[in-house]
Amino acid sequence: MINVTNQISRFDIFHKKCRVPFARYFIVLLLILFLLSGCNNYAPNSSTPTEKIDSNTLSEPNSSATSSLSENTSNNISVSADSKVNISATEPLTCGEFVWLWMAKLDGSLNYNKTVSQAVEIAKQQGYIPSKSNVNEALSIQEVAYLLTSTKLNSSKIDTTHYNWQISDLENADSSYKVNLLTAYAEGLLTTDNGNIHPKNSVYLKDATSILMRVTDVSQRLLPPDYTSPYFEYQGLVEVARLDPTIVIDLKYATTDNYTGVVQYSRALCLLEADTAKKLIKANQYFQKQGYSIKIWDGYRPESVQWSLYYAAPANLKQYVPAPSKNSQHSKGIAADITLIDKNGKEMAMPTGFDSFSDAAHADYNNLPKQIIENRNFLISGMEQQGFVVNSLEWWHYYMPDKTNLQISKVSLDEFAEKQNEFYQTNIQKYYSDSK
């Protein structure tokens, strides 16, 4: 505010120097008008916050604004001239700015004329944010998750423990935020990029408007994982495609393209034991960084199918397809038959095709072109980094050694599909009803 005392002192000095009475009075009038207009302009009002919230002085952003709050997030946003709240699209948001956007979205007005400090105070009073939120510092994804899930918006009851492995960047989060990140992800409030939630990344206008649209509009929320419905596990088995749709599924026993020439599976459904599937997805993420993806030829194999394959194999080749036993890795869901494909979907050159039943299929067979050996070893090495072990007779067969003590599963593919369908229908209905 202008210092009125100093202004009057300056006027007295000027008054003594003026020799023409009319001029004096004219100048006095002008100065009075100036003082009145100046005080009015600088007086506290809705456009200039002066109070403190939780001992934190709130400062207004200084960036220029070019458009109103809308779905167009490529520009900065502003509100009516009275509010003087300008938010840049190219600068990280502070907590206060995010809350202001939040309250503007809840208000449903393109001209929400509260200040940042007023919006924060209202949000606290209404229970949208914790009372001790630090509203001045730049905001990260993990802090957004905290704001969204530590208050009354946290209404969904989805079990967050199903999601901690899907967010591969979660280990970079501060420990105090992990539950909030998982909850926000499980509720569909935060999305990920190939499983990476980047918890410490700064939040920008584009991110904030996308998040807040889902917060205020249940129909816009994405059921987690982002590309499917919630995680489903039945008797220890999960569907690989639901967990990672970038893995190509080409189940040979669901077609006639196998050594028996007969369709063996009742449906093309690729299942794996849950931890094995999670490790396979980690392996796929590793290969994707190198420009390749995993293609699965076989996963969980019902015991009945294992018997069928055993009987169909010639007597001299039954070592490749043994009868079901306590050692049947496929029938436990702990083994996957895989190869690699490039970005165009072309299979990487390998020693043999699937179910070759030849010496060339052995993991240590070296009477091969150098490039073929390098390709095979590249696959083996990548899988070993995730804890898999290659079958010495089949370069395509990988299993989890710490899961070999599991029992053979008795689940049929049709039974799993039926239970999964029931789960999704029930859970989706519950998800939306809990989120209203």
Image (cartoon, rainbow, N blue to C red):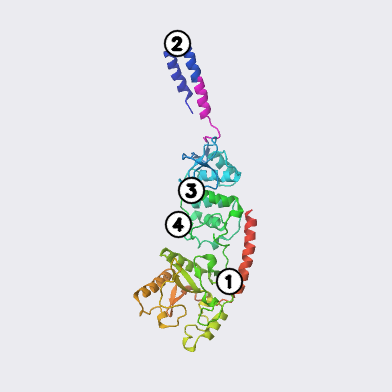
Residue ID for mark 1:
235
Query: Between tags 2 and 1, which lies in front?
Result: 2
As helix, strand or loop, the secondary structure at mark 3 comes to loop
- Which is nearer the N-term, disc 4 or disc 3? 4
Q: Residues within 10 Å of mark 2 (few under 14, many from 20)?
A: few
- Relative to 51, is 424 above or below? below
Q: CA distance from mark 2 to mark 1?
A: 101 Å
Residue 299 is situated, as x and y percent measured from the top left of the image, at 51, 74
Three-letter code, disc 4: Asn
- Relative to 148, is 26 above or below? above
Residue 241 is situated, as x and y percent measured from the top left of the image, at 53, 67
Confirm or deny contact between disc 1 and disc 3 (CB under 8 A): no
- The residue stretch that appears in magenta: 32-50
- Please give the label number shown on residue 204: 3
- Of residues 298 and 7, which is closer to you in this image? 298
Side of 296 where 370 appears, left or right: left
Query: Between tags 1 and 3, which lies in front?
Result: 3
Q: Residues within 10 Å of mark 3 (few under 14, many from 20)?
A: many
- Relative to 43, is 389 above or below? below
Q: CA distance from mark 2 to mark 3?
A: 60 Å
Residue 336 is situated, as x and y percent measured from the top left of the image, at 49, 74
Confirm or deny contact between disc 4 and disc 1 (CB under 8 A): no
Residue ID for mark 4:
172
- Which is nearer the N-term, disc 2 or disc 3? 2
Q: Residues within 10 Å of mark 4 (few under 14, many from 20)?
A: few
Q: CA distance from mark 4 to mark 2?
A: 75 Å
Query: Between tags 4 and 3, which lies in front?
Result: 3
- Please give the label number shown on residue 149: none
In the image, residue 430 lies in the stretch drawn in magenta = no
Residue ID for mark 2:
20
Residue 217 is situated, as x and y percent measured from the top left of the image, at 60, 51
